[in-house]
Image: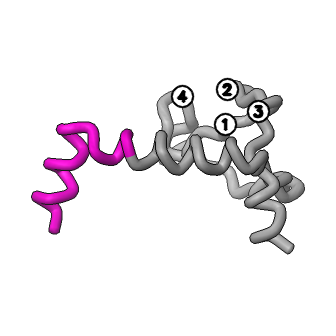
């Protein structure tokens, strides 16, 4: 199974499938294209570079964030 996945990855099959599905969804107006994602909303993993080292760890509560809004009308229906 993995070999097939890698073969499709390398020969572009997954990209063609994604492009075709995206074109179908866009033709049905299921995609909202006015979304902008930038690095300010990406959270780093706790083990990412620049975090405190093991001996200097302080316990803290995880930051809570509101749930993300769906980016497509298809996602909105699935979330409802």
Q: Is residue 16 left or right of residue 51?
A: left
Q: Considering only order in the chain, which callout, 4 or 2, is on the residue closer to the N terminus? A: 2
Mark 4 to mark 1 CA distance (whole Å): 15 Å
Considering every residue shown, the one lying at the far left of the view is 3
Provide the secondary structure element on which disc 2 rests. helix
Mark 3 to mark 4 CA distance (whole Å): 34 Å
The residue at which mark 4 appears reads as 50
- State the image coordinates of residue 5 (x, y, percent, origin top left): 21, 56
Q: Considering only order in the chain, which callout, 1 or 4, is on the residue closer to the N terminus? A: 1
Q: Are marks 3 and 1 in contact (CB under 8 Å)?
A: no
Mark 3 or mark 1, which is nearer to you? Answer: 3
Considering every residue shown, the one lying at the far front of the view is 27
Mark 2 or mark 3, which is nearer to you? Answer: 3
Q: Are marks 2 and 1 in contact (CB under 8 Å)?
A: yes
Mark 2 to mark 3 CA distance (whole Å): 18 Å
Q: Which residues are magenta?
A: 1-16
Task: Answer whether residue 61 is visible to the viewer in this image.
Answer: no
Give the quarter of the figure containing the C terminus. bottom right
Mark 2 to mark 1 CA distance (whole Å): 5 Å
Q: Nearer the viewer, residue 29 or 49?
A: 29
Q: Tell how many labels.
A: 4
The residue at which mark 1 appears reads as 42
Q: Considering only order in the chain, which callout, 3 or 2, is on the residue closer to the N terminus? A: 3
Q: Nearer the viewer, residue 36 or 60?
A: 36
Provide the secondary structure element on which disc 4 rests. loop
How many residues crowd around disc 4 within 10 Å: few (fewer than 14), some, or many (20 or more)?
Answer: few
The residue at which mark 2 appears reads as 39
């Amino acid at each position: 199974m993995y070999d097939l996945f890698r073969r499709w990855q390398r020969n572009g099959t997954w990209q063609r499938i994604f492009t075709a599905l995206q074109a179908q969804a866009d033709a049905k107006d299921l995609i909202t294209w006015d979304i902008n994602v930038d690095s300010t909303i990406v959270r780093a993993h706790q083990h990412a570079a620049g975090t405190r080292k093991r001996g200097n760890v302080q316990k803290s509560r995880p930051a809570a964030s509101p749930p993300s809004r769906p980016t497509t009308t298809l996602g909105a229906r699935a979330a409802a």
